[in-house]
Amino acid sequence: MSSGTGLESLVDPQVCAPLMQYICCEQFNSLSLTTFLCAETISVITNDGRNIVGVLKGFDQSTNIILDESHERVFSTKEGVQQLVLGLYIIRGDNISIVGELDADLDSTVEWSKMRAYPLKPVIH
């Protein structure tokens, strides 16, 4: 967790407290999910097909999220994945399609510079 970013006033310490007990599936709502993932590295797929990876620092009732140490992974069929550094980044909730926890150990073993893939198409609701 980085210090001095000024995010301390935006993040509710009770919401980001470590998860102390097992959460059953029927109790696993969006609040408990973000409680579980707060200060964890997550991957966000936006409605326009962008893949943004960063450390979850905060959220609100509209699912707007704050990411720190974030970067965008730009996929291409012609060259490896480019990782564009974004730093502290806010994503509007209405632009979020998928949020998932990232396995840091598995992610570090992937050679992103050699991976080629088609970019995601925009999500149509």
Image (cartoon, rainbow, N blue to C red):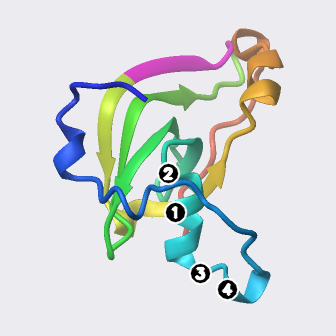
| Crowd class of label 1 (few under 14; some 14 to 19; many from 20; radius 10 Å) | many
Whether residue 9 appears in this view of the structure is: yes
Residue receiving disc 2: 38
Measured Cα–Cα span from mark 1 to mark 2? 6 Å
Q: Are marks 1 and 4 in contact (CB under 8 Å)?
A: no
Q: Amino acid at mark 1?
A: Thr
Is 116 on the left or on the right of 39, as rendered? right
Residue receiving disc 1: 34
Q: Which residues are magenta?
A: 79-85
Q: Position of residue 85 (x, y in %)?
A: 40, 19
**Residue found at the very far bottom of the displayed protein:** 26
Tag 4, which secondary structure? helix
Is 27 on the left or on the right of 58, as rendered? right
Q: Are marks 1 and 2 in contact (CB under 8 Å)?
A: yes
> Residue at horizontal 55%, vertical 28%?
74
Measured Cα–Cα span from mark 3 to mark 1? 9 Å
| Pointer 3 or 1: first along the chain | 3
Query: Hey, which quadrant is residue 18 in on the image?
Result: bottom right
Front in this rendered view, residue 60 or 44: 60
| Pointer 4 or 2: first along the chain | 4
| Crowd class of label 4 (few under 14; some 14 to 19; many from 20; radius 10 Å) | few
Q: Amino acid at mark 4?
A: Gln
Residue receiving disc 3: 29
Residue receiving disc 4: 27
Q: Are marks 3 and 4 in contact (CB under 8 Å)?
A: yes
| Pointer 1 or 4: first along the chain | 4
Whether residue 125 appears in this view of the structure is: no
Measured Cα–Cα span from mark 1 to mark 4? 13 Å
Is 14 on the left or on the right of 7, as rendered? right
Q: Amino acid at mark 3?
A: Asn
Measured Cα–Cα span from mark 3 to mark 4? 6 Å
Q: Does 102 appear above or below 60?
A: above
